[in-house]
């Protein structure tokens, strides 16, 4: 019997549900910032110790959390939005924990929550500066590149969301994601 259980401890935890919403509690905000540090400081090396800046003082953090027994457990996705000027909103610091990127939907759902929320708060335009390797992903989500810029020594595109593809909603929205297993065909 032990032989059948040998690899159980090595298997990664795969949640059956995720929630996506504006961060509501202290632990969600703390997880939002911790994930950003993990991605932008440790993984990508874009910033030395912390990626926080003056925008964080007025930005709205949005999180994706994996659930255990139906309750939010750990922050695995983050993005922030803010109104840069009247009617012009921006999204930034999109991050998804490496172990949860294989799901594929977390980043897209964070983007959708960000744009729909800003749209509901009066956005006439929604912009983001997107790292070069993510431009195709954003194009698939109905974004247009407005040109290239260099930020923190890395190539980015200034991109704009097609607001007609993102229905406006209020701040109180919570979306539930249930990942579907990927079925691989055998040769």
Image: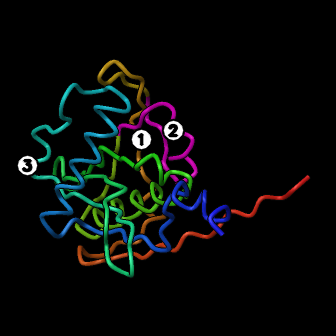
Residue tagged by mark 2? 135
Q: Residues within 10 Å of mark 3 (few under 14, many from 20)?
A: few
**Residue ID at (56%, 53%):** 102
Q: Across the whole image, how many numbered discs are drawn on residues?
A: 3
| Magenta span of residues | 129-147
Q: Which circle's residue, 1 or 2, is located before the other in the chain? A: 2
Residue tagged by mark 1? 159
**For residue 40, which numbered disc appears in the image?**
none
Q: Are marks 3 and 2 in contact (CB under 8 Å)?
A: no
Residue tagged by mark 3? 57
Answer with left or right where residue 76 lies relative to residue 182. Answer: left
Q: Is residue 12 above or below residue 91?
A: below
Secondary element at tag 1: strand
Mark nearest the camera among 3 and 1 is 3
Q: Residue furthest top?
A: 153
- Residue 113: x %, y % from top left: 36, 65
- Residue 22: x %, y % from top left: 25, 66
Q: Are marks 1 and 2 in contact (CB under 8 Å)?
A: yes
Q: Quadrant of residue 23?
A: bottom left
**Residue ID at (55%, 69%):** 179
The verdict on residue 46 being magenta is no
Cα gap from disc 3 to disc 1, whole angstroms: 23 Å
Secondary element at tag 3: helix
- Residue 33: x %, y % from top left: 21, 48
Mark nearest the camera among 3 and 2 is 3
Q: Is residue 163 above or below residue 153?
A: below
Answer with left or right where residue 137 lies relative to residue 160. Answer: right
């Amino acid at each position: 019997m032990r032989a059948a259980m040998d690899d159980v401890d090595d298997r990664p935890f795969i949640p059956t549900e995720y929630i996506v919403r504006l961060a509501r509690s202290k632990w969600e905000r703390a997880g939002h910032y911790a994930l950003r540090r993990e991605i932008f400081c440790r993984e990508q090396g874009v910033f030395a110790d912390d990626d926080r800046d003056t925008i964080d003082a007025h930005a709205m953090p949005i999180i994706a959390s994996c659930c255990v027994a139906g309750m939010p457990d750990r922050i695995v996705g983050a993005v922030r939005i803010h109104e840069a000027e009247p009617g012009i909103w921006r999204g930034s610091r999109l991050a998804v924990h490496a172990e949860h990127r294989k799901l594929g939907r977390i980043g897209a759902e964070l983007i959708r929550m960000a744009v729909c929320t800003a749209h509901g708060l009066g956005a006439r335009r929604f912009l983001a500066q997107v790292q070069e390797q993510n431009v195709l992903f954003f194009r698939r989500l109905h974004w247009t590149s407005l040109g290239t810029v260099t930020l923190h020594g890395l190539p980015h595109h200034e991109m704009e969301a097609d607001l007609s593809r993102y229905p406006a909603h209020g701040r109180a929205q919570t979306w539930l994601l249930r990942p579907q297993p990927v079925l691989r065909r055998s040769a």
